[in-house]
Amino acid sequence: MSFEINARTILLGLLGHPVAHSVSPYLQNKLAEACGLNQRYMAFDIADEEALEDAVWGGYAMGVKGFNVTVPYKKAVMEYLDEIDPIAQKIGAVNTLKWTDSGWHGYNTDMPGLLRALAYDGVEIKGKNVVLIGAGGAANAALCAALEGGTARVLILNRTVAKAEELAAQFAKEYPFIPIACMGMRDDFCGFMEGFSNEWIALQTTSVGMHPDVNGLPVASDEFYKLLSVGYDIIFNPKETAFMKRTKAHGGRAFNGLRMLLFQGIRSYEIWNDVSISDEIAGEILKGMEAAIVK
């Protein structure tokens, strides 16, 4: 079902810079059609942070039902919110705004999006060992997902150990009974991993291997990949990254980040409209996304 834009059309949108490459309009407009709701979603390129406040409050004044927020504004937007969801507080970033009578409410859907993507692919985090590759912005949500999912332990691998330790400290007080270790790429991380299990789930959160540098590997050691039962890469272009190929070559299952992208967007839509999107609808939209953007 589709609607022509009219005086009753409800507006949703994306705030970020740049946004011309975003697939969020495709995803969100498909969800509106699937739910039979007269809504349209647009991407708004906010070129500098000084204009962010105007965009946020201008949208509120016009009754925009909700915004997604992408780089580089996921942290900066938090100062304009009336209320922030506890998960978003833990992660320290907001990617979804919902209009309310009292002001904007902020959420982070990256974490639940990742957990639902893993479940969709039959990957169980609870009680398993997780190795997190990277300690940048995307790693926050991935670490939160692992901890919320009930992982047995986490190892954070990063070129700069101090940055990994900073990330670990951010979550240690909230999850005191789950050990979080931090190591550098030159450390004996394989020896550490072998001391616990030869089946780890790797969450790859760096940009290494993204198109066009498709041959990049975040971890070079073959011994590392032999220890993985699952390798999950947040990159979705190319469809199969070098990290995924190496994981499969050593007997592990591997997945790209397109489902995470899908389910974080679905969670935003569910928040805005108080609806529940089935896996069946998600699967149909996923097919269109794969055809449109994955190389």
Image (spheres, rainbow, N blue to C red):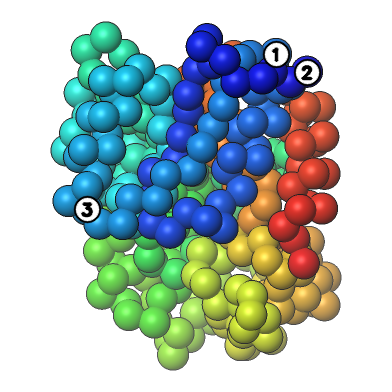
The spot of residue 173 in percent (x, y) is: 24, 44
Residue type marked 1: Gly
Instruction: Answer few, some or many: residues within 10 Å of disc 2's Cα (few below 14, many 20 plus, some between 14 and 19).
Output: few
Residue underneath mark 3 = 49
Marks 2/3: CA–CA distance: 37 Å
The spot of residue 180 in percent (x, y) is: 38, 59
Q: Which of 16 and 181 is in front in this view?
A: 16
Q: Nearer the viewer, residue 68 or 245?
A: 68
| Image-based side of 39 in relation to 179, left or right | right
Q: Nearer the viewer, residue 264 or 16?
A: 16
Instruction: Answer few, some or many: residues within 10 Å of disc 1's Cα (few below 14, many 20 plus, some between 14 and 19).
Output: few
Which residue lies at the image location 27% right of the left edge and 9% below the top edge? Answer: 101
Residue type marked 3: Glu
Marks 1/2: CA–CA distance: 6 Å
Instruction: Answer few, some or many: residues within 10 Å of disc 3's Cα (few below 14, many 20 plus, some between 14 and 19).
Output: some
Residue underneath mark 1 = 36
Task: Check contact, mark 1 vs mark 2: CB within 8 A.
Answer: yes
Answer yes or no: is residue 50 visible: yes
First in residue order: circle 2 vs circle 3: 2
Q: In which quarter of the image is the N terminus?
A: top right
Residue underneath mark 2 = 1
Which residue lies at the image location 41% right of the left edge and 32% below the top edge? Answer: 67
Which residue lies at the image location 25% right of the left edge and 63% below the top edge? Answer: 166
Which residue lies at the image location 50% right of the left edge and 70% below the top edge? Answer: 206
Q: In this view, does 13 lie above or below 117?
A: above
Tag 2 secondary structure: loop
| Image-based side of 187 in relation to 207, left or right | left
First in residue order: circle 1 vs circle 2: 2
Marks 3/1: CA–CA distance: 35 Å
The spot of residue 123 in percent (x, y) is: 71, 46
